[in-house]
Image: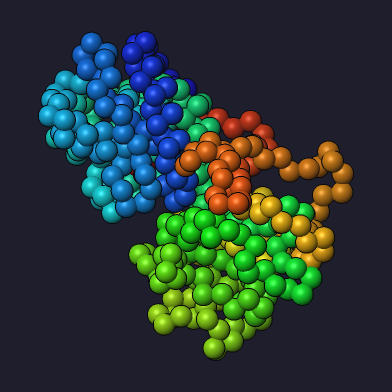
Amino acid sequence: MTGAGNVTAFSAAETAAMDTALEAALRGPRGANPLVGAVVIDAEGRPLVTGYHRGAGTPHAEADAIGQAAAAGLDLTDCTMVITLEPCDHSGRTGPCTQAIIAAGIKDVVYAVDDPHDPAAGGAATLRNAGVMVRSGLAAVEAFELNRQWFLAVAAHRPFVTLHIAQTLDSRIAAEDGTSQWISSPESLADNHGLRGRIDAILVGTQTVLVDNPRLTARDASGTTSGKQPLRAVMGLREIPADAAVHGEDGYVLHLPTRDPHEALSVLYAQGIRHVMVEGGSRILSSFLAAGLVDELIVYLAPTLLGSGTPALSGLGITTLADARHWEWDPSDGGAVQTLGRDLRLHLRPEPLEALEPQPSRTAAEPAMGGY
């Protein structure tokens, strides 16, 4: 989709490159950053390198592609880079993609949709000021759909929300006596700890803290805490016991004295949290789903039957099939269905409640909004 004064014809090679970039982007994980892919083509339209973003702290798609080219001894002078999202113009965990593009001598940039993330403003304008031709709008609808939930979270000024459920075939997260360790296989537990190492915060309810006394840390196979640790957030009106394991040795824990998921996310966002994983218990999981605040759903499904016990979900306010909440399989980050030991890992995202389209792309005279 293009704005007035920015109607541009794209070549068949650029269109094919964008298709490849969109496919490559799906190899990355969802979260605080969008999925992004980038392809560099030469003057004859032949693809040279394809990059994608592998998650927070790793090279962005543009830098990944440029790095591959450098390793292969390729000269990108006068080449065209095709990207699924506007290049960033800020320094965070990585440097600005705009400067990497300029330094590589790339003469032409084609991107799909504008980046709404304010801190990274100015990508397209910076490139144009450096003499790079910039065009946008190619496959804009497809690129917006690729990161639909991320765009919605950014617009709402709230963290991206991943909801995690470990359950039996009959949708139980605990037996009738309250025991729940371990419903999931060791492989599923390892995968979950990998997720914990990527998020900014992990959220549970006070009931989970009182009953299970979890540590809520990211740990390796030996059980040792490893790598980046998420903020441990506990939501609910009851106090957290002083000896609760969630305090840990670092005290990196936040009590959210509310039952309102909107309020909880607002506080977390103000704390700089951009990706939160909600882990339980049942009432917390249900409250986020009922409020329509879940962007990504990951379910570890164990081939186990309990027949009774704590249901994974309850109280969603749905009384008729016509009001059911529908989800779609998410092919990103390893695919919609994976086998982990004896378990299945199901990866989904909500179906859009209504048709959503990206905003019209800016003309050359309009300011850019930033990068990822």
Name the residue located 65 percent from the left edge and 52 percent from the top edge: 301
Q: Nearer the viewer, residue 206 or 85?
A: 206
Occupied quadrant, residue 25 = top left
Quarter of the view holding residue 271 = bottom left
For this orientation, the residue located farthest to the bottom is: 242
Q: Tell which of 347 and 143 is nearer to you.
A: 347
Figure check: 16 above or below 286: above
Residue 352: x and y, percent?
64, 37
Q: Residue at x 40, y 72 (%)?
A: 224
Residue 58 percent location from the top left of the image: 31, 48
For this view, does 230 lie left or right of residue 38? right
Q: Residue at x 42, y 69 (%)?
A: 222
In the displayed orientation, state which residue is furthest to the front.
Answer: 342
Quadrant of the image for the C terminus? Answer: top left
Q: Position of residue 209 (x, y in %)?
A: 61, 77
Between residues 175 and 9, which one lies in front from this camera angle? 175
Is residue 54 visible to us here? yes
Instruction: Name the residue: 59% across, 78% down.
Output: 213
Q: Residue furthest right?
A: 320
| 196 relative to 257 in the view: left or right | left
* Figure check: 158 above or below 249: above
Total labels: the figure holds 0
Q: How is the image coloured?
A: rainbow
Residue 211 is situated, as x and y percent measured from the top left of the image, at 67, 78
Residue 192 visible in the displayed image: no
